[in-house]
Image (tube, rainbow, N blue to C red):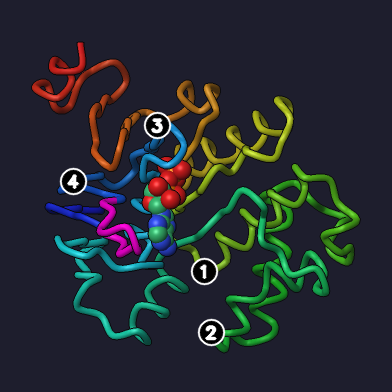
């Protein structure tokens, strides 16, 4: 589903070049629930942004669902993001002037989906994330957990096979965070949606079936439910 090959991301600063990511290789299979963990500033969000086509690597190849992201034009990359990936962010990124239903419908409208189909789909999504009765409310009238559920419904609107979440529980208390992780787990198990989630949340380690640990721009550990995928890396960490 996702193949990262020799990927580096370098930022040019006044002080010189800075490697946010150094020569990383990762392969994520369809249906995996992957948590990317590591200290702040280690490159987690950068890696997620590259996988989601939000940014391009300085070198290396990124292939998602058979699509070589480096080879797409700006326009094709926008279409890729809109149709193939559902994004979920720490601060929800809902539009404050739109209602819950309108926020969820945004990508469908942009994609010129017929109005009747949009209404049906939004209704179903609101049910799926347990927000019935809130469709006409504005984001500011909802709790953080509810806003994140709107964001997840919005991410699901185009029926993506892949969800990329950057600290989805970062602004939530334990209970709401746990509800969001449960919702993501359900989507992963029942809808077989592949999930890649950047997180600091220790609870996340219990729901993901694979944990990739990054330090200083390098993947230093990659474990699937207790099994090291890359033994040499894992043993060098021991
Ligand atoms: P994490 O998600 O692990 O906290 P990030 O991926 O956000 O880390 O950032 C990795 C490193 O790259 C950080 O040191 C950050 O300051 C740097 N960085 C991120 N974006 C930019 C940018 N646009 N310009 C320069 N440096 C950046």
Measured Cα–Cα span from mark 2 to mark 3: 36 Å
Q: Can see residue 77? A: yes
Q: Position of residue 11 (x, y in %)?
A: 31, 61
Mark 1: secondary structure? loop
Q: Can see residue 196? A: no
* Mark 4 residue crowding within 10 angstroms, few (<14) / some (14–19) / many (20+): some
Residue 101 left/right relative to 74: right
Instruction: Write down the quadrant of residue 84 in the picture.
Output: bottom left
Residue 226 vertical placement versus 219 (above, below):
above
**Mark 4 highlights which residue?**
24
The quarter in which the C terminus is drawn is: top left
Q: Earlier in the sequence, mark 2 or mark 1?
A: 2
**Mark 3 highlights which residue?**
38
Whether pointer 2 and pointer 1 mark residues with C-beta atoms closer than 8 Å, the reply is: yes
Q: Which residues are magenta?
A: 10-19
Tell me which residue sits at (28%, 85%) in the image.
73
**Mark 2 highlights which residue?**
111
* Mark 3 residue crowding within 10 angstroms, few (<14) / some (14–19) / many (20+): many
**Mark 1 highlights which residue?**
158
Judge: label 2 CB < 8 Å from ligand 1. Answer: no
Measured Cα–Cα span from mark 1 to mark 3: 30 Å
Measured Cα–Cα span from mark 2 to mark 1: 9 Å
| Residue found farthest to the left | 232
Q: Earlier in the sequence, mark 4 or mark 2?
A: 4
Q: Earlier in the sequence, mark 2 or mark 3?
A: 3
Q: Position of residue 237 (x, y in %)?
A: 20, 17
Tell me which residue sits at (68%, 67%) in the image.
104
Judge: label 3 CB < 8 Å from ligand 1. Answer: yes
Dominant secondary structure (helix, strand or loop) of the stretch shown in magenta: strand
Tell me which residue sits at (26%, 24%) in the image.
223
Residue 2 vertical placement versus 79 (above, below):
above
Instruction: Write down the quadrant of residue 133 in the picture.
Output: bottom right
């Amino acid at each position: 589903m996702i193949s990262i090959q020799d990927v580096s991301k370098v930022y040019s600063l006044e002080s010189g070049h800075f490697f946010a990511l150094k020569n990383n290789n990762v392969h994520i299979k369809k249906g995996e629930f992957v948590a990317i963990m590591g200290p702040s500033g280690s490159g987690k969000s950068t890696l997620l942004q590259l996988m989601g086509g939000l940014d391009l690597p300085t070198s290396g190849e990124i292939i998602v669902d058979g699509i070589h992201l480096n080879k797409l034009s700006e326009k094709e990359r926008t279409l890729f993001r809109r149709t193939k990936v559902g994004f979920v962010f720490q601060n929800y990124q809902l539009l404050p002037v739109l209602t819950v239903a309108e926020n969820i419908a945004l990508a469908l409208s942009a994609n010129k989906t017929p109005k009747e189909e949009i209404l049906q789909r939004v209704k179903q999504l609101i049910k799926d994330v347990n927000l019935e009765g809130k469709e006409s409310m504005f984001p500011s009238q909802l709790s953080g957990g509810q806003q994140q559920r709107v964001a997840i419904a919005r991410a699901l609107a185009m029926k993506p096979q892949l969800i990329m979440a950057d600290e989805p529980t970062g602004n939530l208390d334990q209970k709401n965070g746990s509800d969001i992780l449960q919702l993501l787990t359900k989507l992963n198990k029942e809808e077989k949606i592949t999930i890649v989630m950047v997180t600091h949340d220790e609870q996340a380690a219990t729901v993901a079936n694979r944990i990739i640990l990054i330090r200083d721009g390098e993947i230093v550990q990659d474990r699937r439910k207790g099994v090291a995928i890359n033994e040499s890396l894992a043993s060098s960490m021991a």
